[in-house]
Image (cartoon, coloured by chain):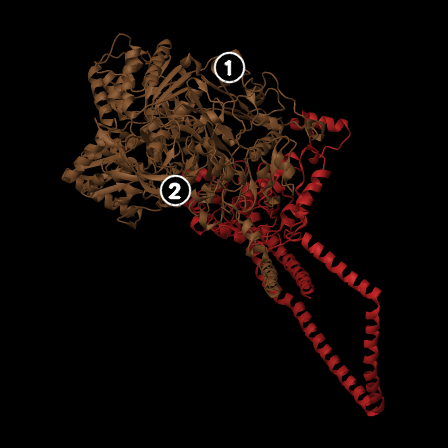
Chain colours: A brown, B red
Amino acid sequence: MDSNKKYWKGLEELNNTPEFVEKNKHEFAEPIPIEDVLSGDGLLGKTPRRDFLKAVGYGVGAVTLAACQRVPVHKSIPYLIKPEEITPGIANYYASTFEGHAILVKTREGRPIKIEGNPNDALARGGLSASAQASVLDLYDVSRVKAPVQDGAEKEWSDLDDYVKLELAKIKDAGKKIRIVSSTVTSPSTLAVIADFIGQFPGAKHVTYDAVSYTGIIQANQNSFGKAVLPHYHFDKADVIVSFGADFLGSWISPVEFTAQYVQNRNNKSLQGKKMSRHIQFETGMSLAGTNADVRIPLKPSEEGIALINLYNAITTGTTLLGSKKLSDNATNNAIILAAKELQKAKGKALVVAGSNDVATQVLVNAINAALGSYGTTIDLDNSSNQYAGNDAELVEFINEAKTGDVAAVLFMNANPVYDYYNAKELTAALAKVPLKVSFADHMDETAAVCNVVAPNHHYLESWGDDSAVAGYYTVLQPTINPVYNTRQAEESLLIWSNNTVPVYYTYVRNNWDKNILAQGGLSGQKGWETVLQTGFIKVADKPAGSYSFSRDLNAVAQTILAQSAQLAAPGDNKMELHLYQTVAMRDGKRANNPWLQELPDPVSKVTWDNFAAISLTDIKKLNLQEGDVITIDVNGTSIALPVLLQPGQAEGTISVAVGYGRAKGGVVIESGVGKNAFPFHSFRNGTFQTTGVAAVSATGDSIILAQTQTHHSYEGRNNIREASFTEYKKNPYKNSGKDGAHKDYKSLWEDYSDTEYKNSPYNWVMAIDLNACTGCGACVVACNAENNVPVVGRDEVRRRREMHWIRIDRYYSINEEGKSITEEREIDKLANLNNVSVVHQPMLCQHCEHAPCETVCPVLATVHSSEGLNHMAYNRCVGTRYCANNCPYKVRRFNWFNYWNDSRFENYLAEQHTQLVLNPDVTTRFRGVMEKCSMCIQRIQAGKLKAKIEKRPVKDGDIKVACQQTCPANAIVFGNGKDPNSEVSKALRSERTYYVLEELNVQPGIGYQVKVRNTTELEA
Amino acid sequence: MRSISLIFKKFSGSVLLLACFTVLGFTAKAQGDAAKGDAAKGEALFKSSGCTGCHKIDQRMTGPALGPVMTKETDDKFLTQWIQNNQALIAAKEPRAVSIFTQYNQAGMPAFPSLQDADVANILAYVRAEWKKEQAATPAPAAATAEASGPSNLVVFGLIGVIILAFIIILVLNRVVATLERLLSKGGVPIIEEEVSEEAIPVDRWATVKKLAKNKKLVFFILFCGTFALGSWTWFALWNTNVHTGYQPVQPIKFPHDLHAGIMKIECQYCHSGAFKSKNASIPSLNVCMNCHKTIDRTLSSKTASPEIQKIYDALGYDPQTQKYDSTKARPIQWIRIHNLPDFAYFNHSQHVKVGGLKCQTCHGPVETMKEVYQYSPLTMKWCIQCHKRTDINMKGNAYYENMIQVHDLIKRGVKVTPAQLGGIECGKCHY
């Protein structure tokens, strides 16, 4: 019945090294000096009577003195004039925008404390990413620029305006050039402001570039179809998805939206309709999309182009591009042919994407997609995406202009090229020749530090504005708090400096909407604007997506691709192919000062607070390295030293490094030193920034321990993942769920709750987690941090296994070799490589067991069961014996080793009075020495019940949503009342695939998981 | 003594005032008769037409203080026109009308077309008469105070007399004692005898103590009693640590709940409006105070503005003369919190007040009789739980409870439906 496939969390666990076994046996990562105390001087040493009495006397005296204080007087300060809409104690929600997604901002007593998805968001239907959840913390960041700065000194806005206006006037008279350098601007009003500014200054030009660029796709579309746009992809319409290094679930273009789309063909509903999409991923390093793929094939960057050429040849039967050659690896060759067959079968419902930023590669991908009839179905060029519009060549051109001294002023808007441009030295030298450098950065980042004027921008929660992530979708941005510091919106600065007739940005936005946007949604005037502020967006019906045919000659393109491949194919010893990627949490590094994101374990490597060099098992042996050894990676003379991480599934001979780390300036977290900057490894080839290269690798002899959470909470080899193939599922939906045969009826030690007073309790709060929907993105972890005031502990404490996250996402590897899964540990020992791993993500949180093992061992009854099926934790009762954590089979209890909220060691994270304004006032912060764990957002349950009572009605299904469920873009988590047979959660738990983790322990968990289904068989057949 | 003098003062003052009023009243009446209107009719009209909503005779409210204004302005024709339809006058740009309009924050006075010329004349007569009465009365109290202080001075002098008398008595008594002692010392011998006996007695006394100390039962009993007393004191002291029943701090404004909630019978929720919808009952913001205190700046009996109410104006930066707010002068009032529930306990007012239908007094005590509010309940967990175990749930007409099988089952079994029965004493219901 049970799946007997072997799953492992990390290499230590796989190899089961004696050190690891020893370490995991103990409760704590570090040995407790109990032995030292008990032996040697510890207890045998004599304590003189006088010393003892002195100590006792001092102790009693000190405690008495400390207790002799007056009870503190608490002040209550009401509003002088209370705004009508605010009732202290009740949250207000405002519609706003984050990166083009419609969101709701929860505010309490006038301060935003949580970001929630707008359930009607056209992109992700209420799903949000980890960075969206974490963005509210940036508002309270003490490292923000607090006032305008000119030449290092704080200034008044009026003085600064006078200075800048004068300078700009001089430049205008001299007829010199002005450049506005920004990352992609998706806001229609901001674009209008920039256009107005350029209208005032004829020498001005807007240079758009993105740290992680998509210029390749845009230019390829220009070449292929004459449309220089980023298409809008529809993964929901694709039955077969083949991705070449595009991490579309983690970081590629619009991952949250794509996750929501992708899961529609893989969730419970789709499976019950016997339908499941198929996802094949060819990639170098293990990405989030790769972990979710049905088939994942490691592929070197140098072979990506060749593989695509082969795929093209196989799809367009009869054509063979000039110079086509087979791949070095036979299995990969076969995989390409099989993938081509499947794609052809799914014509019109197929989608091929590539992560490369190379124009030639993307042209080839366009040709493949056109041959598959994807345009008009899975790819929409007519309702294009605005999310990335950068042009890499423009930035390079700007630098060249600056070098000659032609540029007299540059304004950096949401751009930090000194950090993320590959040749920062060249850029800094060029900038030295620009007399007026203005940055609108809200942190004193690397670029702002070399600017003579810093005009700090508002945080987005303090701003008015709008956004349009895809054509026809307009979202509105409204402030939810008065500016915390003396900042001003960048757009307003531009309006003032260009002497615009409308110098107030709010009015400007209003005018722009009145004139151009409201009418598109059938609205008008004040009433229309107020409607938009309520709903948050306007969605114009999509234009019909046209189908496009590809007619260009591809032979030249193939030549370019092949030439590049030849360059990349690493020559010589200790040379490896380098592949740069973005992590899900850090992305391009703009939010690097956010401790929530830094502590979010990477979905694949589970590393926090650092980046690293991921290499394969074969290479680590070849280089004679151990995990954690620091190596120097040298690309064209630029080198950085990074610790090595053994990554199963990494293509052999390659090395993957994440960008977005190693920021030098811009906040206390950044300046505490987090990772190394890999942006200098980018190169400018064929008109775009490329993320691949050749690296020389050498060991430094140093070694560090990465703060990795993956093996912290061990099950000691117990089997808690269940998996089935889609074919098996279709034959028998109960496959591997443990229900398809001998389902054991476990005897219980305790009296059944159904016999007690509680049997008629109207609620039993339970949860269902669909392992097939969960992509492992980690948004739930940050949402939980924000909702439940979970502290950040920092790198050192994570190394000691002391991270505090209430929900973690366990990532399990399993190995398939030659079409069969490995079932025995000894078979694993014999494996030559770990390339063919498949991955399962499992969110793990308190299971709220009916027979909770933690409850029976608590000596002070601090954790007890409730009539509503919850496992309560009374912090003030807890004395910190930690028995409960020891006895928890799921290892979900967390101990507060420090008073993280008021301890100078944690000042950089959340132990800062100002930062603590983000705390949820409905949840207590826990003190040193107590246990904590997931409460199933009991504050939300209580609030939901109270609302029903006030409205004199029973609680409706869906009234109460827990934080992790609410943010999940994949809707993998369903929460509700198990006693209501019609609730969503009851329906989900009745699914054939439902199983309970460690069911055999008979702890009767309240959280049911649904078997992971993998659509694998077809390729093997 | 002070209170007695106060009573004296009040009593004699009011007698004098009464006398003054009677005299002045006659003269005023005589004068009123001389004027055109009928003051008595005017008074009735003044009160029934809604004038009092914005006007007082002696004091500025939304509109000007009528007494001085109408006495100064003798053009009755203008006044009549103004009262009947002031907007027409303003529209006609009558300079006097415009100046009044701008001077009083452009607050539009409603037109009173129903008032005939005669009616207005009556009102004018009433106002003028009333103002004269008051003006005449104003110097009188000064005289009255001077006289009124007489009795109180008498009391003070009386007191001083009593004290002097007491001193004299003490002195005399001292003399008597001294004389008696002198007489005794003349006897001589008995005193020496006493001294001898005094030397002998201590020996005996210690002997008794020693004897008693040897009685083990007694020693045990005393020790036991001592331990018991000390132990129970410690026990109760510890139990009541951090329990602040009766805590009555001095608030920045002496806000009398007995006046507002008791005498004036203002609903608790009028000010503490959060109690019905939020977890916080909330201290009212000052704009709620100003709903009434914009026009009420003194107690009923007082003739001068109350310094406590003035504190509201100061906090808001409000100038009662110009009736304008100056937000730069605004300073929030820092009330001292009386009911301090610890942070780890979640309490929601709306659950108890709106859903449970509890009276505020159940936990806060007879606030309507408190001059200064104090903590009435101990706010301990024991106190919470006791109530949760004893109180019936208010479920009538609430579909939330009525559709609950659990409730039906409890009723069927004859069990009282209390919050505790529905899980209301589980840890996680208040601690999260």
Describe the element under mark 2 as helix, strand or loop: loop
Density class for disc 1 (Cα within 10 Å; few <14, some 14-19, many ≥20) is many
Q: Quadrant of residue A567?
A: top left
Residue B50 horizontal/vertical position (percent):
57, 41
Q: Residue at x 42, y 45 (%)?
A: B102
Is A264 placed left or right of A887 in the picture? left
Q: Is residue A402 visible?
A: yes
| Front in this rendered view, residue B362 or A69 | A69
Residue B88 horizontal/vertical position (percent):
44, 37
Q: How many marks on residues? A: 2
Q: Is residue B361 visible?
A: no
Kindly identify which numbered label has been placed on residue B181.
Answer: none
Density class for disc 2 (Cα within 10 Å; few <14, some 14-19, many ≥20) is few
Residue A256 horizontal/vertical position (percent):
41, 26
CB under 8 Å between discs 2 and 1: no
User: Which label sits in the foreground, 2 or 1?
Assistant: 2
Q: Residue at x 69, y 66 (%)?
A: B1
Kindly identify which numbered label has been placed on residue A729.
Answer: 1
| Front in this rendered view, residue A379 or A652 | A652
Residue beneath disc 2: A704
What amino acid is at disc 2?
Ile
Q: Quadrant of residue A565?
A: top left
Q: CA distance from mark 2 to mark 1?
A: 44 Å
Image quarter in which the C terminus of chain B is found: top right
> What's the chain of the residue with tag 1?
A
